[in-house]
Amino acid sequence: MLFDLAFIWAGLIAFAVLVYVILDGFDLGIGILYPFARSEKDRDMMMNSVAPVWDGNETWLILGGGGLFAVFPLAYAIIMPALYMPIILMLLALIFRGVSFEYRWRTKRWKGVWNVAFFAGSTVAAFSQGIALGALVQGIEVTGRSYSGGWFDWFTPFSILTGIAVVVGYALLGATWLVLKTEGDLQVQMRRHAWWLGAGTLSLIGAVSLITPFLEPIYFERWFNLPGSLVSMAVPVVMVGLIWSFFTGLNDGKDLQPFLSALGFFVVSFVGIGISFYPMMVPPSLTIWQVAAPDQSLAFALVGAVILIPIILAYTAYAYWVFRGKIDPAEGYH
Amino acid sequence: MLDGFTAETLARVQFAFTVSFHIIFPAFSIGLASYLAVLNGLWLRTRDETYLNLFNYWKKIFAVAFGMGVVSGIVMSYQFGTNWANFSDKAGPVIGPLLAYEVMSAFFLEAGFLGIMLFGRERVGDRLHMFATAMVAIGTLMSATWILSANSWMQTPTGYSIGENGQFIPEDWLAIIFNPSFPYRLVHMVLAAYLTVAFVVAAVSALHLLRDKTDKESRRAFSMAMWMAIIVTPIQIFAGDTHGINTLEHQPIKVAAMEGHFDSHGDNQPLALFGIPNVEDGVLDYAIEVPYMGSLILTHSLNGQIKGLNEFPKDEWPPVMIVFFSFRIMVAIGFAMLGLGLWGALARWKGKLFDWPLLHRAAIVMGPAGFIAVLSGWITTEVGRQPYTVYGLLRTADSLAPVDAPAVATSLMAFVVVYFFVFGAGTFYVLRMMNKRPTTPNIGLNDGPLRTAGITPAAQVDPDFISGE
């Protein structure tokens, strides 16, 4: 049985995580880029470009966590203790960064403190997410129904590499988002940063992709045997197209194209990870079906998801549309 | 520093700490979102600027409180897994979908429309802005509904079976959602949130009335808050009473601990006004008791029979001391609220509502009362559920993740430091905003742009000014 409830839910959770990465990626990226801003005015604009949408973006992270709890409770119960430290670190970092959106405007003396909190919170959150990804790809030790590894199993050169990759990748999304949303000097700067961030992201994605198949024999098999090898051949082709589109977009002064291409890097990488994982939910030992909640839970939650997720997507799109267009720096300084 | 504590104790302290901090913000934002929707509705209907000024004033305070609620809430959604993995594995099939519904039907609604409510009036027009404001308010209420359903199921589980692997398997979702204690708990909590905000609004308006009793916005807000106090407090006391009777039916041990009933008194249960529970000897020391009142309140009959703690094995008892006192604090605050409500009604009747400094001082003192009552109420019901997470079925000791004490201790200390720092700063900013009059154009120091797309400090002249593109 391929298209059963557990399979559909695995797809939905993957979708929620992908939407999270796409949406919160660029707004975390803006925090990561904070030290590169040249003036307080630029920092104001950078923050304002995501301010109306950031908490909607972060809600996808709650859906990822809450959804996992709801439909794959065993995976949730194993992965969370296994990634204890990176998860706690991410939560604490998100607190600092989240409150900065409001606090920064509420004080003069401490504005610098909340600038730093915004930068450090965003960076640490992105880094922790990357580490969590790396640790998951490497595999989690399970005995019976619980995690049986140590407290620092997540801490490996590979997970540090994925951590850095996510930080650089999110910064790239942030820079291209600002190319889209700003004009003038700030846009010129961000276009320049997008160049090296793009090159960096691609090198890191390349390094992670080269190492991954050798971490677990199953990943290797999946990538280099049919039907997986069809995809492993398609992925580089699509990637080359995206890379071309990204750099020509930057060169030709396009505003939207670099952002969409950078999102494309993430989508393709995500699909790649999905191929490596499937049908595992907790690599290397537990499949989607082994960790799934009973059908009664899956069916009940699916009814809600089928009705509500399209509505959520619709009003999220509406909120983006309301706050569309360039941020005008002159607007406030008459 | 935290050596010698077990991982279980530390994880419980951590959960109690993070959830206690968290509940303060939703309690405030549930009530405030509804208040904002009412203010905005009144502004659109009457076009009386007083309502608009109040809306703009409270929405900024709402934004800060909401931000703190979001970030402290994300912690909760992951903490079930990090510290309470076994609970997550066992109860996940039932609790998980309820939380998923909360995220999908409430959190997205709030977050999606919040930006439009805060900064979008000029961009989308009055009607859509009103719609967005209403959606935020409805979102907070939906959120309360789902989370209280989940919590109530842990108190009074129904509609499940237990699978071979030890998991709770949902059999009847309607029975799960509408479990026996849910309606009582939901009403009690939503009213508590409304009262919390009413008393905060009363305190802030009273402060400004003391400074200038002609301040139009503060007069209007104080009057509204005093109406809430006199109307909603009695309803809340009634709701609390029925909730207590429901608890007596399903969790008699909890009620015995709340009341300090160590011994069954047959058909004449006294009501302990005060005392110090002595769990060791099973007596209430220094008790001040009113005969028959316990039976009267809990069974609405002078001869009602109530079981004392002595009829249950000691390893089923919750921590009696905590439950006994937290319950008394909540009840005492409830009656103090009623007192202030009556005083406000008297002042209104005598035409002195805006001209009675002592009343205004009392209102200021009562400003934080709602928060304390909400916290003590939750402590009563949650500590009273011990030693179980899922009442009668899954013990707290069996709910824990395979975590080591040092890991939990480290994260606990990190949470304590970060929460006091971050939420301390947030509370300071909120109080500083409250200290400014509602008509002050710029209640935050650097208030202008807030989160509008592209609005920078010129907007400080009129914080709502948003020019089109």
Image: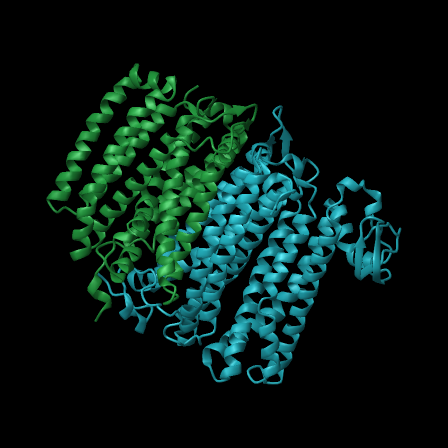
Q: Would you say residue B165 is visible in this rendering?
A: yes
Q: Would you say residue A312 is visible in this rendering?
A: no
Q: Chain A appears what colour? A: green
Nearer to me, B390 or B351 = B390
Q: Residue at x 38, y 45 (%)?
A: A124
Q: Image check: B289 left or right of B127?
A: right
Q: Image check: A303 left or right of A214?
A: right
Q: Chain B appears what colour? A: cyan
Name the colouring of the figure: by chain
Q: Quadrant of residue B399?
A: top right
Q: Quadrant where the C terminus of chain B lies?
A: bottom left
Q: Image check: A249 left or right of B423?
A: left
Nearer to me, A190 or A59 = A190
Nearer to me, B168 or B19 = B19
- The number of numbered discs placed on residues in the rendered structure image is 0
Image coordinates for residue B429, horizontal then vertical, percent: 45, 66
Relative height, residue A5 to residue A191 (above, below)? above
Image coordinates for residue B100, horizontal then vertical, percent: 49, 41
Nearer to me, A303 or A196 = A196
Q: Image check: B284 left or right of B58?
A: right
Image coordinates for residue B157, horizontal then vertical, percent: 65, 39
Q: Quadrant of residue A284?
A: top left
Q: Quadrant of residue B62?
A: bottom left
Image coordinates for residue B192, horizontal then vertical, percent: 60, 60
Q: Residue furthest top?
A: A225
